[in-house]
Amino acid sequence: MNVATTEIHPSAVVHKGAQLGRGVAIGPYCVVGENVVLCDAVTLHSHVTIAGRTTLGAGCTVFPFASIGHPPQDQKYAGETSELIVGANNVIREHVTMNPGTAGGGMVTRVGDNGLFMAGAHVAHDCQVGNHVILANHATLAGHVTLGDYAILGGLSAVQQFARVGRHAMIGGMSGVVDDVIPYGSVVGNRAHLGGLNIVGLKRRGFSRDQIHGLRNAYRMLFAAEGTLQERLEDVAAQFKDHAEVMEIVDFIRAATRSICTPAA
């Protein structure tokens, strides 16, 4: 611990084995455990607890009463020395919880860079979370969930164990997601169904008119009434083989080992 380049409030408890980068700020009543790594310019506001084998990347900011790196909420967890690795420049708001991995899931929970985790959000054991994600208030990821870059979860939504949510997907508030969500998709509802593409998000992130037009046409083909999903998938793959975003959806569906969200009947 290099205290010469950090600011630690006198009431904070920082284990001597913790590794602190330059410019770290630790506020009142925080607790930082023995195997914690706080990279450069991490800020912990008051009453933050960081435990376990947890790494917070450079520039992360953690707000009061967040609980990061404590043992997984999984009855199969047997005390194995698993990890939680959080990338750079994440904003982790009040009462957020993030848990490390387990032996049954690869031993590591990973969170990418530049995420926003609003108050009460939860990232469970063995999740693999991408970059630039947003979890709104009390959004919840169960164990083993994969969340792609730029995905957004609305408030009070929940994603079931082992589900995949593709890049740029949007989960509506209070939705319960039990099936995989295609990249660029927008889902909503209790036992969420696919409601279309995340057009607003695509426009905000600078996708071109041609890219969005191609995605719309492919979406209509994929979820048309005629034929089986497999037949429609092969038709889309043939017609849009040079359209990177459409082929991302095709590859996502081909890799599925569980059901995917589809439009309501």
Image (cartoon, rainbow, N blue to C red):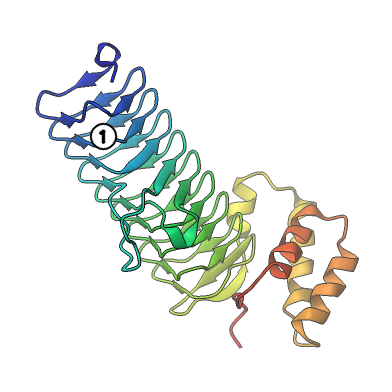
For this view, does 155 lie left or right of residue 236?
left
Q: How many marks overall?
A: 1
- Mark 1 burial class by Cα count in 10 Å: few <14, some 14-19, many 20+: some
> Which quadrant is home to the C terminus?
bottom right
Q: Secondary structure at mark 1?
A: loop
For this view, does 83 lie left or right of residue 50?
right
Q: Position of residue 100 (x, y in %)?
A: 38, 51
Quadrant of res 154: bottom left
For this view, does 190 lie left or right of residue 213?
left
Q: Position of residue 112 (x, y in %)?
A: 50, 43
Q: Nearer the viewer, residue 219 or 53?
A: 53
Which residue occupies 33% across, 26% down?
Answer: 19
Is 169 rendered above or below residue 93? below
Residue farthest toward the top in the current orientation of the protein: 4
Q: Position of residue 42 (x, y in %)?
A: 34, 28
Which residue occupies 63% across, 73% down?
Answer: 257
Quadrant of res 75: bottom left
> Which quadrant is home to the N terminus?
top left
Q: Nearer the viewer, residue 124 or 265?
A: 124
Is 51 rendered above or below residue 263? above
Q: Which residue does the numbered mark 1 point to in the structure image?
A: 34
Residue farthest toward the left in the current orientation of the protein: 11
Which residue occupies 64% across, 60% down?
Answer: 184
Q: Amino acid at mark 1?
A: Glu
